[in-house]
Image: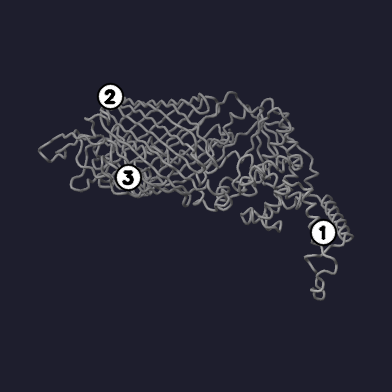
């Protein structure tokens, strides 16, 4: 890696230390990380050669293959650019692997950023990765196909990832369009595949072109471009592509270029392969013979100097003269171009391959993202995520921030800086996090934070404060992947918390330091489709132990289980389920809150009556609060406790799966979902669970406000679980994923008044 670039980036990070980290479990749903692993079983010592238009990277045993690939790519370069009518401005990087197993170890594409629809814009599209599978023809065919695909992406979307995302807001082409033209370029002489074309067309006879996906889409697309070249001429391929780039509609581009309606074009294309080209020509001859009139027919209706254009027959002698003249003109043009020096002499350029050089693993921007975060303690804020990585994505630097745009600006923020090394089988992640929360008062907007601390304003009055709490953590994680889907994570951490009281200048800041250890077992076999919809299962079980270096009474532990499953029922319909269990233990257990939704824009807080008995708690406990996720139908923070159970079930209808992706011109429509949901959960204190009659949920404290001289503890036998159900919609607005949920809650046997929740961010 370029050491100067690394030092420059580290300097930028040090200067930017005024912003955020996503502290653990403050965003229990959207910020929970799972992820699959790439297992590195060998070390790759990369080398580089350059040809006229390509950079090829290889490792031991791949030099000869790289040189042959460079020669093949340069041989096909002119044909590709001429077919597309477009020449890229940048040099393409090609990574060649000696085997499919070696390619499976590559990290390229792991840091692909989310596009505005929630799908993945594959970062590997900016680079080509190829594995040799002991078959030269298949390898070179794949090479040309990948090069052509990248050139088409560059042509249609502008080349850069950012421009590609922006272009997708306006240009969405069906699957057959790009994969088909790439396959056609790799195999321009497709006459031997006519039988495969025929079978695939017949197989998809009842489907719209825009709805065909996968390998069938590639074969269908290849047949379409082959038909256009055979029937209308190869020049029209580049005309169609360039017109699509301008008017952003592939059907209109074909119609305008070929001068035939798209429905008629489809009929003729199908007939070309199903009936055969020779039969079509015979039919055309019969039609011409039937429809061609005698010289005298219809002439009586023509005026002087008019021509019967419907029945006109060209003189064959004149047709042949025109063809010969056109051919002579083309030869003269080619000769004149060859005689002129300059860029038009590409075909005569001599193949140049540089000597083998050491590979330069440059540091590049891996993407950035701005989001709206409704922090549970500080409310509205702006989140920002910036990623830098090397081209192989073995080294990844990440900056995450949260800033609340209010005074005092530099007292409400989070930031985290991390570096991940994924070059070997065992991965390493080093992270520094800091969180700062400033309190100026305790009032109805934040009083729920202080209920577990036995602090509560009386008679709707505010308590004025000038208090700030901070946490700083330094962690080093060791990640051991057992398989691609299963990994073990061990994270030793140094943690420091601080309580600052500005109203008492003589008071010393209260500091505590902890040594923590976090153990996680993570499973993830989910896959996503083109619309960003997940299928499969992912889960995590974690145990954390925190030891105070000076005061054992502050020790605490945490256990958490988070399981999620996404099951496809029918096309466009997914059943998603989540189960989450958490428990905090030890001498100073921490609290979790249930009720409402995460990142809620119109939050209403539950107005609790009474307080828990006991001494006032530690303000710094707020830094460790946990917000597990959605319990709709209830106010925010309806329940809190050291333990909780939460389950969510959603039936999600993704409308984009019912319509051709290319027909949905806006991200609003492409990401539109309708959901039905059911939430159930509870939280409690102590060791007696929700199924015990003496649990904390069935206990009501009377006279715990500190004013009444009487105190009583009353036990009831109500249902400890809260249930919420309703419907909702989700879509993308101005780049933000926005959710609206309308829910009714059931507590014991009573139903609450329905509530509307507006929130931002992904579902679980």
Q: Secondary structure at mark 1?
A: helix
Residue at which label 2 appears: 552
Question: From where the camera sits, is residue 411 visible?
Answer: no
Question: From where the camera sits, is residue 194 visible?
Answer: yes
**Residue at far bottom of view:** 304
Residue 164 drawn at (x, y percent): 58, 47
Do the numbered discs 3 and 1 sit on residues whose CB atoms are within 8 Å?
Answer: no
Q: Closer to the observer: label 3 or label 2? A: 3
Instruction: Residue 127: name its quadrant.
Output: top right
Residue at 25 percent across and 28 percent down: it is 688
N-terminal label among 3 and 1? 1
Q: Which mark is residue 633?
A: 3
Q: Is 184 in front, or is 445? A: 184
Residue 760 drawn at (x, y percent): 41, 47
Residue at which label 1 appears: 289
Residue 62 drawn at (x, y percent): 69, 28
N-terminal label among 1 and 2? 1
Q: Residues within 10 Å of mark 3 (few under 14, many from 20)?
A: many
Q: Secondary structure at mark 3?
A: loop
Do the numbered discs 3 and 2 sit on residues whose CB atoms are within 8 Å?
Answer: no
Way the structure is coloured: one colour
């Amino acid at each position: 890696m370029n050491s100067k670039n690394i030092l420059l980036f580290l300097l930028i990070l040090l200067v930017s230390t005024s912003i955020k980290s996503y502290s653990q479990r403050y965003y229990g749903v959207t910020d929970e990380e799972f992820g699959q692993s790439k297992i590195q079983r060998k070390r790759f010592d990369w080398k580089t050669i350059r040809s006229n238009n390509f950079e090829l990277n290889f490792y031991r045993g791949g030099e000869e293959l790289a040189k042959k690939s460079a020669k093949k790519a340069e041989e096909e370069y002119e044909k590709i650019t001429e077919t597309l009518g477009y020449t890229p401005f940048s040099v393409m990087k090609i990574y060649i692997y000696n085997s499919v197993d070696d390619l499976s170890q590559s990290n390229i594409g792991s840091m692909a950023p989310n596009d505005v629809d929630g799908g993945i814009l594959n970062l590997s599209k900016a680079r080509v990765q190829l594995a040799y599978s002991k078959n030269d023809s298949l390898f070179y065919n794949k090479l040309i196909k990948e090069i052509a695909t990248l050139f088409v992406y560059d042509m249609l979307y502008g080349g850069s990832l950012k421009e590609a995302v922006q272009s997708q807001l306006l240009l969405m082409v069906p699957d057959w369009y790009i994969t088909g033209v790439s396959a056609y370029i790799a195999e321009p002489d497709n006459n031997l595949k006519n039988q495969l074309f025929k079978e695939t067309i017949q197989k998809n006879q009842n489907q719209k072109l825009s709805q065909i996906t996968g390998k069938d889409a590639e074969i269908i697309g290849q047949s379409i471009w082959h038909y256009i070249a055979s029937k209308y001429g190869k020049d029209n391929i580049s005309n169609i592509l360039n017109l699509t780039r301008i008017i952003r509609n592939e059907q209109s581009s074909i119609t305008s270029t070929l001068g035939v309606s798209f429905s008629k074009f489809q009929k003729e294309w199908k007939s070309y392969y199903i009936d055969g080209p020779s039969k079509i020509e015979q039919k055309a001859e019969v039609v011409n013979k039937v429809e061609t009139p005698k010289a005298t027919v219809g002439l009586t209706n023509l005026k002087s100097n008019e021509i019967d254009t419907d029945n006109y027959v060209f003189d064959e002698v004149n047709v042949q003269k025109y063809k010969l003249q056109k051919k002579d003109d083309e030869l003269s043009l080619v000769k004149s171009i060859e005689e002129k020096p300059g860029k038009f002499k590409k075909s005569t350029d001599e193949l140049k391959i540089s000597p083998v050089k050491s590979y330069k693993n440059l540091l590049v921007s891996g993407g950035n993202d701005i989001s709206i975060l409704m922090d549970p303690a500080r409310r509205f804020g702006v989140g920002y995520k910036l990623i830098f990585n090397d081209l192989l994505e073995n080294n990844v630097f990440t900056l995450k921030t949260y800033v609340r745009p209010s005074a005092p600006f530099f007292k409400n923020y989070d930031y985290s800086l991390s570096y991940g090394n994924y070059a070997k089988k065992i991965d390493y992640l080093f992270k520094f996090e800091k969180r700062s929360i400033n309190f100026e008062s305790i009032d109805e907007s934040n009083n729920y934070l202080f209920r577990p601390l036995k602090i509560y304003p009386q008679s709707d009055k505010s308590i004025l404060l000038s208090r700030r709490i901070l946490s700083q953590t330094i962690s080093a994680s060791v990640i051991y992947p057992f398989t691609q889907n299963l990994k073990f994570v061990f994270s030793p951490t140094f943690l420091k918390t601080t309580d600052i009281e500005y109203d008492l200048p003589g008071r010393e800041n209260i500091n505590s330091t902890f040594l923590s250890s976090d153990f996680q077992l993570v499973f993830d076999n989910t896959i996503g489709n083109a619309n960003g919809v997940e299928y499969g299962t992912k889960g995590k079980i974690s145990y954390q132990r925190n030891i105070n270096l000076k005061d054992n009474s502050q020790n605490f532990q945490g256990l958490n289980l988070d399981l999620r499953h996404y099951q496809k029922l029918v096309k466009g319909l997914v059943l998603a389920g989540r189960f989450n269990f958490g428990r905090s233990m030890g001498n100073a257990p921490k609290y979790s809150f249930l009720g409402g939704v995460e990142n809620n824009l119109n939050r209403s807080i539950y107005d609790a009556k009474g307080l828990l008995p006991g001494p006032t708690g530690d303000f710094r406990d707020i830094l460790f609060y946990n917000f597990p996720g959605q319990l709709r139908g209830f106010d925010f923070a309806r329940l809190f406790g050291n333990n909780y159970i939460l389950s969510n079930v959603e039936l999600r209808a993704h409308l984009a799966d019912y319509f051709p992706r290319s027909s949905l011109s806006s991200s609003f429509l492409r990401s539109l979902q309708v959901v039905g949901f059911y939430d159930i959960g509870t939280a409690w204190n102590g060791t007696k669970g929700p199924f015990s009659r003496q649990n904390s949920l069935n206990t009501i404290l009377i006279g715990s406000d500190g004013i009444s001289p009487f105190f009583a503890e009353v036990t009831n036998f109500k249902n400890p679980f809260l249930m919420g159900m309703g419907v909702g919609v989700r879509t993308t607005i101005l780049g933000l994923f926005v959710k609206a949920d309308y829910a009714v809650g059931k507590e014991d046997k009573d139903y609450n008044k329905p509530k509307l929740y507006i929130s931002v961010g992904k579902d679980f």
